[in-house]
Image (cartoon, rainbow, N blue to C red):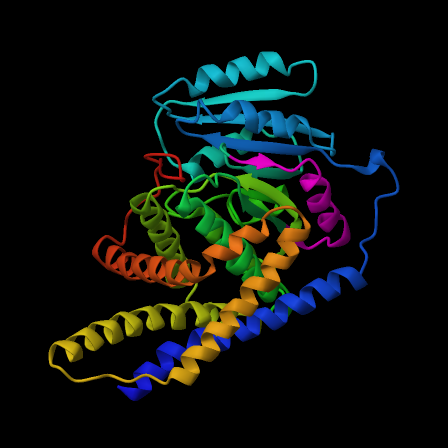
Amino acid sequence: MFLLSMFVILYPLIVSIIWIMGSIFFGIQQHQMPLKQPASDADLPLVSVLIPSHNEEETLYEVVASVADLTYRHFELILIDDGSDDATLKVMYQLQRHYQDQFVIKVVPIVDNGGKANALNIGLKQAAGDYLLCLDSDAYVDQDALSHMMLRFYNDPKAGAVAGRPVVRNRTTLLGRLQLLEYIGIIDIIKRGQAFITGHITTVSGVIVVYRRSAVESVNKWTVEALTEDIDMTWKLYTKDWHVIYCPQAVSWILVPEHIRALIRQRRRWARGGLEVLVHNRQLIFTGKLAEQWLLVDMIISNVWALCCAFSVLLYFLTILLAQALILDGGILFVLTIISIIQFIIGFTSSQRQGYVDWQDLLLLPLYFIFYWVVNLVSCITALGSFFLDPQRKGVWSSPDRGV
């Protein structure tokens, strides 16, 4: 029992330290290694902006308006309606007429809801660009985001994908503000740390990512059966020796779930998508590059940790019922808390300078730690059960990912 308790406590402690150090050096590296700039605007390639949508009539106007403000001007927009039940398709045609004098908009209607991966594959057939900016239909893209991302392709001919950074914009509820802290205090730091230490990231953010078209076609496009097309595509690119780059300067303002059931449903889908990728790429644990082996082993240990943590909690309460005290090392718990606070402050300081968060958000810090571990633990456990009970489940949208 003691060894189990130590594993449950020490694993997140060690991983947090690794990602914190990697994140710090990632920032230093970016400042010390300036990127080469294109000689002129004439060298800029055409980018096809793909926005697949399902029941997004209320969000499309502002999302397309943010695309219209991009400083990178050599693009076309492809709006894909994936079997919506509302007026999404009608809105798309209205937007096409409104912006017809500014840039090309192509509307692609799909009768039956086939999921995001299928929508992207169909949209790709209409795309003329050599690069594909994929955006969620409820996310605002920062005006300089595409310029930052395309610069990475210019500097790395083996770059197959460049992932941007999501920042939460719906902050009127407690759950929304807690997720804001999670995105800037956990998710961003993990990706920075992975990018520096391994040269890989576990997954691009499907909400904002640019793919090299030839890279997507080299892996036979998006996998329609995948529950999380972004995680699946990331690892398909690795199998063909493409690079996947994290670009935190490329920001997309996203909507997140505002109800706990919707949040758990979203995170369960993420966790299950990771399990699918782990199973499909298990051979890379032995044959892949060291970075790929490390990330896959980390995914395995994370799932084992979740099971051990759930077992420890259950055993703890059973012990209480039997009137016997289970004592954990308070010193280790204290160190884990301090490390978590440091991890948050690093992400918070960077985001605060850029205006993403306010100092008042520190008031939610105690609740934030409980929120992060409990939500992800529940999501992981339920995803494991879902995966083994229904391994053939296909990814089809039933509602927007924010779960409203």
Q: Which span is picked out in magenta?
A: 139-160
Residue at 45% of width from left, 50% of height from top? 179
Residue at 43% of width from left, 84% of height from top? 331
Q: Is residue 313 above or below residue 240?
A: below
Q: Position of residue 35 (x, y in %)?
A: 80, 54
Question: Going by the image, does 134 lie left or right of 54?
Answer: right
Q: Is residue 389 above or below residue 146?
A: below
Q: Is residue 127 above or below residue 354?
A: above
Image quarter in which the N terminus is found: bottom left
Image quarter in which the C terminus is found: top left
Residue 162: say if magenta: no
Q: Position of residue 396 (x, y in %)?
A: 34, 38
Q: Is residue 138 above or below residue 298?
A: above
Question: Going by the image, does 227 lie left or right of 102?
Answer: left
Residue 42's quadrant in the figure? top right
Question: Going by the image, does 404 lie left or right of 81?
Answer: left
Residue 142: say if magenta: yes
Q: Position of residue 245 (x, y in %)?
A: 64, 55
Q: Is residue 200 visible?
A: no
